[in-house]
């Protein structure tokens, strides 16, 4: 404690406003990580597999976690090794974009695995085309020169009055 005690006289309304602005700013900087789910089947075709893996890569690039679910039906349950083979292929194709957060495990008729983005990826905004600022005379600074002559002789000639 300070001796003598020190207090600060302040505007309480202004203090509450500034605190709310700080809280709002800190909420802006937080990133909501959502979990996207991609479902596979053991007999998936090559084209469908590639498409789903491409979607997973996009989700991981955006910073989302991806839950990979492999659904078994009927007699497919007799061969869970086929499902784990597909999930291994998914891990191989995703490559450095994602790391396995929860390895594949069989839960009833579903085999699930969770992939998380490898590192914090900040999505870059597309570059906007630069537009030139007008100069003092109102023309664009980097405007292309025109091929037309400075003075047009036809425009300057007086019109012949037939009257």
Image (cartoon, rainbow, N blue to C red):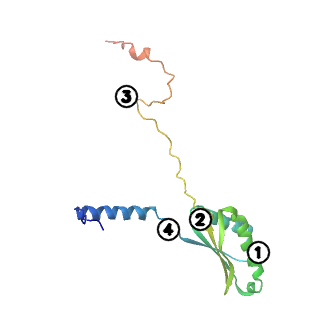
Residue drawn 53% across and 50% down?
126
Looking at the rendered image, the quarter that the C terminus falls into is top left
Q: Is residue 56 above or below residue 155?
A: below
- On screen, residue 123 versus residue 102, left or right, reads left
- Badge 3: residue crowd in 10 Å (few <14, some 14–19, many ≥20): few
Rendering coords of residue 1 (x, y %) = 30, 68
Residue nearer the viewer, 3 or 30: 3
Residue 85: image tag: 1
Asked which secondary structure carries label 1, the reply is: helix
The residue that label 3 is drawn on is 136
- Which of the two marks, 4 or 1, is nearer to us in this view? 4
Counting residues from the start of the chain, the first of labels 4 and 1 encountered is 4
Q: CA distance from mark 2 to mark 1?
A: 22 Å
Residue 103 sits in quarter: bottom right
Counting residues from the start of the chain, the first of labels 4 and 2 encountered is 4
- On screen, residue 120 versus residue 100, left or right, reads left
Residue 32: image tag: 4
- Which of the two marks, 4 or 2, is nearer to us in this view? 4
Residue drawn 77% across and 78% down?
82
Q: CA distance from mark 4 to mark 2?
A: 13 Å
Q: Is residue 150 above or below residue 66?
A: above
Residue drawn 25% across and 61% down?
14
Asked if the residue at tag 3 contacts the one at tag 2, i.e. Cβ–Cβ closer than 8 Å, the answer is no
Asked which secondary structure carries label 2, the reply is: helix
Q: CA distance from mark 2 to mark 3?
A: 48 Å
- On screen, residue 79 versus residue 27, left or right, reads right
Rendering coords of residue 137 (x, y %) = 37, 26
């Amino acid at each position: 404690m300070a001796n003598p005690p020190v207090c600060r006289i302040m505007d309480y309304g202004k203090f509450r406003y500034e605190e709310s602005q700080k809280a709002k700013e800190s909420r802006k900087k937080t990133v909501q990580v959502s979990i996207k789910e991609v479902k596979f089947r053991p007999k998936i075709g090559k084209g469908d597999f590639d498409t789903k893996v491409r979607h997973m890569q996009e989700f991981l690039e955006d910073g989302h976690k991806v839950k990979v679910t492999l659904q078994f039906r009927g007699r497919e349950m007799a061969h869970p090794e086929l499902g784990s083979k597909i999930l291994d292929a998914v891990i191989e194709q995703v490559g450095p974009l994602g790391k396995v957060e929860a390895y594949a495990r069989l839960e009833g008729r579903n085999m699930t695995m969770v992939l998380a983005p490898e590192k914090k990826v900040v999505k870059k905004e597309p570059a906007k085309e630069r537009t030139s600022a007008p100069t003092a005379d109102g023309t664009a600074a980097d405007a292309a020169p025109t091929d037309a002559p400075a003075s047009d002789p036809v425009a300057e000639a007086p019109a012949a009055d037939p009257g």
